[in-house]
Image: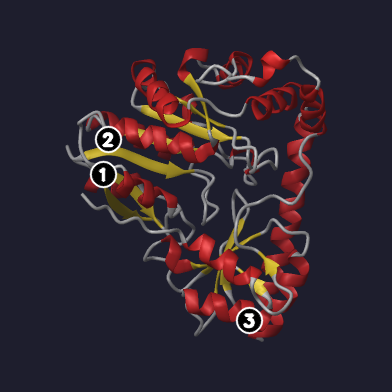
């Protein structure tokens, strides 16, 4: 059977920007530009001098010490934790686990949506089902309840959210868990931006005691190490063993030195590291949204994560307009149409460049 996969537009836009004949400020992907924790670099140096046996396969579910550290911080049993190849694999395992339970074939997603979610849904043989969010990116659980049925395998949400920056309140997450339990579905909460809660209102779904809930996360954003590919998923006890088996069959195991360095960083990095990066982002949000005001644009002010969506009159968020913006303004963002039907008039910009102020000035000049 032939299956068609859609290649995410991220790769096209990044390639187009890289080949442009002018200086382009990259605001496409969420690759943090700030320093990783000092302890992470120290851990890598230390690892290079270890005995040869440390250069062999780690335990497939992840280094025992790393899983124990994660479990202790998240208030779960170590055996519930699977260390994955970034949050991408964590979400893949969670979605696969939901669909292979033979408890429905639909995965409920929000619109706008991070485009890898519908891509994975299709790849795994599921059907995406979309529910709208409001102008600020918030989800009304009543809309989810209205579409949930015996065909619902999972409800997948991302908080803090990419692309809208919304942070879902605890009562929303509790209602989503209740809906999942009612229909024997799973709530999958992708919390990869949890350290970038700018609102002070984020609460992990792990605070809800439920066996119909999976939480995914990674150190890619919080430690500015997207290239290390160290993530994790926390499964209910009755779902974790099959997830471990799928992880082993797909990957065998993750990178041992990357996990070792992350463990050192977890143990030795204080809260001030994460607070400083949040402060940096708050400043960038101010600079960027001030420029959007000057340009007369509508915009979202993120409660979390590090993305701003903007709408310029007469300039819909198409791929063609993104390419035009690269060529004529020297700023690369993402087309709103990449995130679903509800934000087709918008563009998304990632504030993970030290040139945010220059990008803001270019946009203000271009659209004045």
Give the structural element (helix, strand or loop) at label 1: loop
Is residue 168 rendered to the left or right of residue 289? left
The residue where tag 3 is placed is 327
Give the residue at mark 2. Answer: 99
User: Closer to the N terminus: mark 3 or mark 1?
Assistant: 1
Q: Position of residue 50 (x, y in %)?
A: 77, 17
Contact flag, marks 3 and 1 (Cβ < 8 Å):
no
Quarter of the image for residue 333 reads bottom right
Quadrant, the C terminus = bottom right
Question: What secondary structure is marked by label 3?
Answer: helix
Q: Is residue 296 visible?
A: no
Disc 2 is placed on an element classified as: helix
Q: Is residue 337 left or right of residue 260?
A: left
Disc 3, disc 2: CB below 8 Å?
Answer: no
- Relative to 287, does residue 228 appear above or below in the rendering? above
* Crowd tier of the residue under label 2, counting other residues whose Cα lies within 10 Å: few below 14, some 14–19, many 20 or above: many
- Asked if one can make out residue 366 in the rendered structure from this viewpoint, the answer is yes
Tell me, for residue 125, which label it has, or none: 1
Q: Tell me which numbered mark, 2 or 1, is placed earlier along the sequence.
A: 2
277 vs 249, nearest the viewer: 249
Q: Residue furthest front?
A: 52
Instruction: Quote the CA–CA distance across marks 3 and 1.
Output: 38 Å
Q: How is the image coloured?
A: secondary structure
Q: Nearer the viewer, mark 2 or mark 1?
A: 1
The answer to which quarter of the image holds residue 26 is bottom right
> Where residue 209 sits in the image (x, y, percent)?
41, 21
Q: Are marks 2 and 1 in contact (CB under 8 Å)?
A: yes
Residue at x 58%, y 66% (from the top left corner): 15
- Considering depth in this image, is 277 or 67 the residue closer to the camera? 67
Percent position of residue 278, x then y: 72, 45
């Amino acid at each position: 059977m032939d299956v068609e996969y859609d290649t995410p537009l991220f790769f096209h836009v990044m390639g187009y920007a890289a080949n442009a004949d002018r200086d382009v400020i990259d605001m496409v992907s969420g690759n943090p530009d700030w320093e990783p924790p000092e302890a992470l670099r120290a851990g890598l140096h230390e690892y290079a001098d270890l005995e040869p046996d440390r250069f062999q396969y780690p335990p497939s579910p992840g280094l025992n010490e790393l899983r124990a550290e994660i479990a202790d911080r998240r208030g779960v049993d170590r055996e519930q934790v699977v260390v994955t190849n970034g949050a991408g694999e964590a979400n893949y395992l969670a979605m696969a686990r939901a669909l292979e339970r033979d408890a429905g074939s639909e995965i409920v997603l929000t619109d706008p949506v991070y485009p890898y979610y519908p891509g994975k849904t299709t790849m795994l043989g599921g059907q995406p089902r979309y529910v709208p969010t409001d102008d600020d990116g918030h989800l009304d659980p009543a809309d989810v309840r209205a579409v949930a049925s015996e065909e619902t395998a999972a409800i997948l949400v991302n908080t803090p959210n990419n692309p809208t920056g919304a942070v879902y309140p605890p009562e929303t997450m509790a209602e989503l868990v209740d809906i999942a339990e009612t229909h024997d579905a799973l709530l999958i909460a992708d919390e990869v931006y949890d350290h970038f809660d700018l609102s002070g209102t984020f609460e992990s779904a792990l605070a809800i005691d439920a066996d119909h809930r999976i939480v995914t996360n990674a150190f890619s954003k919080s430690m500015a190490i997207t290239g290390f590919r160290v993530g994790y998923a926390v499964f209910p006890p009755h779902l974790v063993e099959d997830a471990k088996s799928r992880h082993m069959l797909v990957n065998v195991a993750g990178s041992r030195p990357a996990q070792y360095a992350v463990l050192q960083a977890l143990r030795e990095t204080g809260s001030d590291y994460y607070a400083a990066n949040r402060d940096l982002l708050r400043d960038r949000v101010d600079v960027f949204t001030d420029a959007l005001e000057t340009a007369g644009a509508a915009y979202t002010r993120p409660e979390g994560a590090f993305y701003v969506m903007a709408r310029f009159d007469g300039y819909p968020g198409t791929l063609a307009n993104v390419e035009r913006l690269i060529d004529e303004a020297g700023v690369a963002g993402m087309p709103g149409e990449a995130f679903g039907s509800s934000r087709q008039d918008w563009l998304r910009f990632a504030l993970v460049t030290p040139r945010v102020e220059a990008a803001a000035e270019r946009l203000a000049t271009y659209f004045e």
